[in-house]
Amino acid sequence: MASRPSVTFAPSFGSEDEGEQDFQYDFHNVAAHQQQHMGPDHNDPRAAAMQTTGMGGGGRPNLLGTYALNSGIVGASSRNLNSAIGADDGRSLVGALGQSIRHHARMIDGDQLLPAESTAAKKAALAAYDPYQDDDHVSLAPAVELNYEKEAREVKQHDGGSAALRAFAANASVQGANENSTTGSGRIHGAGQSSVAPLAETTSSRFSLSNWFTNSFSNLSDRGAKARFSETEEDEVVAVIRDGGTGLKGGGSKLFEEAPKERFVVQTSGSPDVDTPRAPGRIETPFFWLVPRSGANAVRTVMWRCLRLAEASEAGAGEELNVLKIVDGEDKRYVNVDLSTSKGLAHAKELNLASSGVPDVIISGDMHGTLELFNNLNRARVFAVFRNPIERAISKYYADLASDPDVAGMTLTQYVRQGGHRVQNNYLTRHLSGRYGGKLEVFHLDVAREFLRRKFVVGLARDLPATTNLFTHVYGWNNTAAIMGMDNAEQCYQTIFNALTDSSPPSVDEGSEGWKLLVSQNWFDLKLYEYAEYLFQQQIDQLKKKGSLKLKATAYNRTMTSTPLNAALAAETKANPPKPVEVVRLEYSPLKYVVSKVSLDFKLYTGRTLVESVLTVTDNDLQKGESDVGGEDGLVLDGEEATVKLLELSVDGCEGALVADVDFFLKPGKLIIKGDTLRRGASSNENVMVVRTTVEIVPEDNTQLSGLYKSGDMYCTQCEAEGFRRITYYPDRPDVMATFEQVRVEANSKDFPVLLSNGNLVKEGTCEGGTNGDTRKFAVWSDPFPKPSYLFALVAGDLGCLEDSFTTMSGRNVALRFYSEHKNVSKLSYAVESLKRAMKWDEDTFGLEYDLDLFNVVAVESFNMGAMENKSLNVFNTSCVLADPKTSSDANYFRVEGIIGHEYFHNWTGNRVTCRDWFQLTLKEGLTVFRDQQFSGQINNCAAVTRISNVLTVRGMQFKEDAGPMSHPIRPDAYIAMDNFYTATVYRKGAEVIRMYDTILGTGGFRKGMDLYFKRHDGSAVTCDDFLAAMADANDTDLSQFSRWYSTSGTPTVTYVSSFDEEKGLFVIGLSQTSRSDEPLFIPVALGLLDKETGEEVLPTTVLELKEMNQTFTFPVKGDVVPSILRNFSAPVKMVPASGVVNESDMAFLASNDTDGFNRWDSAQQLYAAAILKVMDGKEYAETLDLVLSTFGATLKDASISDDAIRAYALILPGESTLAEAVTVVDPPAIRNARKFVKKAIAKKFKTELTAAYEKLTACVEADTVFKVDGESTGRRRLRNVYLGYLCALDETAEQQIEAAKIATAQFEAASGMTDKLAAFNCLVSMSGEGSSARDAAIQKFYDDANGDPLVIDKWFACLASADLPDLLDRVVKLTNHPDFTLKVPNRCRAVILSFTASAAFHDDNGKGYEFLGDMLEKIDKVNSRVSARTTASSFLSWKRYNEERASMMKAQLERLKAMPTISNDLLEIVMKGLK
Ligand SMILES: [Zn+2]
């Protein structure tokens, strides 16, 4: 990427605690309670008299009759409901009962009502509970199924008995669990390669949150299967529920065909959808599906005790009459049928129970058997109470323990293994999907969900009051109760709920093996229950809002969250952040397992994004890699648990669910899947394993701007260096190069019509799944080129596009699409043109052609870096891609072209060949910066000007960095936060190192080296050593000494001493090098010689190879010469005379005569610097100043200089940061004053000439009718603005101030483009005295003219924050309170804060500037830690270079930051380096 000074914050996102898990049981009391209140009384003498048909009898109205009279389901009751359930809560019917009732609800249990007889469904249901009863089907949950099955078959071969197996399994050893197992006693070890898994694995629970998900795809690597599932099978699910089980017989899906069809009887036609109004005159009977141990009995009690409903249930067992009647028991009224047996159901059918209207409510545990009583005309309205399936299962365990001698005394684990049909096994899913026996597929879960959604009024055991309220209002029972004069119904509920006792339950060891087994065995039910919870809330909300249930027919929500697998870890690392770890270069080792193929599916919702990944993993055995799992062999995935919630994890082919700490490990930042587990899933002769995960992330909360985040209204990504681990679990390191075969992105189509990712667009369209009826859109992208995760990109937004095309050298047509916010599209054309130039240049210069049919570029406002070279989807900071004369300066244009080129060039140097590890960053960045510098210089025919600006950056930024505590070699040896190493050293010095290859080998040799580099390494991740080897081998030369540049930090110094031996006609130059390397570096020193008399060049540029500590070079010359040393800045060194004193007259000579454009400029700079430093140090400067003035004058008037840009550079004094590098103790105010002094002296002396020159150029500029950014126009503007700067430097008298303000204001107002306007504005903001009013007017006008354009506002802030004014700090503090200021957008933050730190006022003696920055950094670090770290690095870190007072005040700020309780890793690393 293109490095930028930049920032960020580190909020820790912990996942919330996912609700309590307290199991509270007192089934003894509950049983007693039930006995007392619920026993049906069959001997009621009045029963016979209560025989009735139609509207009830025995003097009591039939409540159903009343119900049938209601015009709607809810009718007038909604008012009551609202008052009853409370407007704000919606949970508590009887307000005061509140929380404790929910505790009670846990204890409401009934016996598990197993369908008992004869129907096929019932038979199958029974089979479902005992895997060993049915030879054809084992039917434990998928979690343990296969292993049980394998084992069962194996054991049967041995002893032919399943009873033996059960005993065996129960006693088998359990790895990691020590409860009551006879270790090893029953272990089967098949001889050799047994197909049977070791028993330890067989019986240990395999806890997978997503096995069910995995199991639904028959072809594991086929994403098509998945697409079918989500897009087509959804319809099938709906059809099953709409049409009943018959929908399947026509040959449903592949999944269905795999299993016997009769197992999928879903009878639904007798039940209308919840939102279907009741047809007038039609008989509809509420049907309460009795889910055992769910709290249903409490509701049932309410129905008969408080509401006096006549129930048709099992209560009429034994009644022989062939006519329906209501039996009026002592408490209970019931119909004389028995719906608990198939015989009873058949009898009820004969008696036309469904059309009779006799019962008020039908109650049965046999869902489909009961629904068969109904049809289209006589319908049943279904309702039920649901409870957490694990609570239900454990409740049943305790009940069985107490009541069933066969299981008495068993531990939970034993019970789960031996309990057979007693043990819960996805009871709900099986019943609702009709899949009583056999293996469950996710399809069944979907059928069950859809059944629930369409047909059920859903109640929850955890909120019985609200549940009861929901039912009574939906069915109008409150009304009927009122009609019957039962106005105390609610008190009655309260009494019932209060009667539920709450005493200490036997504890359940959550996480024990038995518990895990239960979880895995009820996994579908857990998912189904989550959905029931969701429906419950929806129905409550609807009743509150509308007074009726109108469940919208949106598809069932398959994206419900559950407790993330890594929630505990996230909480732990939030509470106790792990210590930052230093990564060391030499400790690199390849991964044992790598990812070769990736499929990703992003579903973007507001506030929540789901990412499903399918990773094809291969054993990297050939590389003999070690994994870093404490010696264990495994697949290591990176993921930030604070950001990435792991919802599901599975390994294809691993039928057993994965067990935490057995099959996989979660550690801070890591998910490790054991090799054994992977291999268990791989087919025996294929080295291919498939790992699937589903995670949830919240891009809206991501202010770090790393990973997937929201920038304005769009989603975008930044993954380099380690952002991908903030998106999903993945081996997030550059040496894992995988093919991203499919990236599917789905989002709301209105807000995000543009969906982009890497590679080619394969497919797009609309899909269902929106909430609130939104239409959703998806796009599928495929990238054929293997790439590391840091090159992944995704963008979604409402973006405008500028499209163009480029034909490559082989004739391929490439579509170029540039995206931005609609209003900015007009500012993209310069970038498009730049890209085309770059593509052409790379073909011409290096023979490198673009490799895909599409190249996308997106402009993003909030971006940490300049831009990012993601494969075929470059993402740019708006400041680096938008260009428009009104808002962009020439520097902006130049920058856009350079960065567009830079990112494009990365396609080969970075993407096709990438870095093995991040220590090698300079491999791609140094090389690519070099390439973009060459491009910029050559394309604009301004090599010298480009070189000058490059070197200014190296000297101003990189040398400073290398002189401070952040000093590191271009290939660092260790880091804590890699983001801190996107430095000037890696980039700029790295580019200088590449340039030295070019200098040493020549352009032809360099090209040969590049060709070999690509030939050897295309498609791989390599090191700096590999690059060096390619360069050396291609040129058949030894570069081993040169390699020291990669490991040496600091700026080397080369001293020179020269002499002329007139007698021998020899010029001798001695060079000596010093650096932090013990051994000498290989330094190419480009030298030219000019005749002292004539100024003629007598030795053209020659590269001296300085390979020793001291070396002497001799040249025969005719007369004395002036050496032009280190031409074109041929090595990143400080070149100084051995004497320590610059030969000023030589510099003046070179400034006028050198043929090397760079050195000509550089000589003048040295001369100017000498004068400024003498002034600063109070030394005698008159002579030097005279030289400066004469050199300046000569340059000003030199007619041979045709390039205005060259002249401009030659007339500018060295900058304050460059000057600071030349002194031992930096005193910024003193440097500024001395520089101003010299500037004024020049301006004073040449005022007339400068004014004339300025006016001449002004006339030229004003004559230009068309705005251009070519070399000529930009050069002219640059030069004119240099003149303006000098003219405005004259500001001592009121008259001068007025004059300066006048000329600057004139330019400011007349400016046709941003360059001229900004230059004038820059002069104006520092004006005072008589210039103040012009200043203030300009400040206002510039802001107004910006009209909110962020890039212009940034310029405004930056100018104001670096003004040369005595009260600058006060002004900057005000700026930070400006409504347009924000810490969240790095560009804005930098504009103010970094600009201020570059001013002399920052270093004011009183230390207030430092304090202010400390205050700001504390705030910034919480928003964006990359920004805080970089700001600190560029400001406080070099404190040792200042005088004692300043140093101690700066250090104090570092100490203060270090003491922050929540300092980010990024900042901490910098601060610690600073304090070393
Ligand atoms: Zn880059």
Image: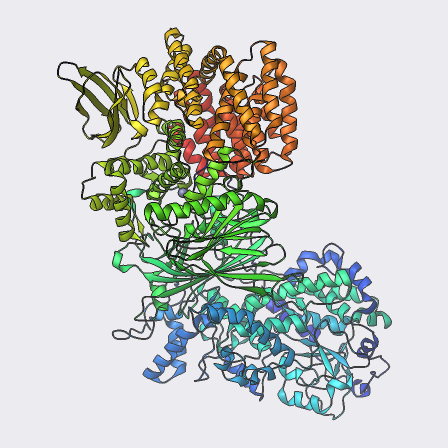
Residue 126 as seen in the image, left or right of residue 1044: right
Percent position (x, y) of residue 343? 64, 90
Q: Residue 349, percent across and down? A: 70, 89
- Tell which residue pokes out farthest to the left in this image: 1064
The type of colouring in the image is rainbow
Looking at the image, which residue is at 43% across and 19% down? 1213
Q: Quadrant of the C terminus?
A: top left
Residue 1199 in the image: x percent, y percent? 41, 21
Visible residue check, residue 1337? yes
Q: How many marks?
A: 0
Quarter holding residue 1350:
top right
Quadrant in which residue 635 is drawn: bottom left
Closer-to-camera residue (142/1031): 1031
Q: Is residue 384 visible?
A: no
Q: Is residue 500 left or right of residue 1393?
A: right
Measured as percent of width and height from the top left, residue 105 is found at: 65, 64
Quadrant of the drawing holding the N terminus: top left
Residue 495 location, quadrant:
bottom right
933 relative to 139 in the view: left or right: left
Q: Choose between 193 and 857: the one closer to the eye.
A: 857
Vertical comparison of 1339 with 525: above or below: above
Q: Residue at x 26, y 49 (%)?
A: 1012
Q: Which quadrant of the frame does ligand 1 lie within?
A: top left
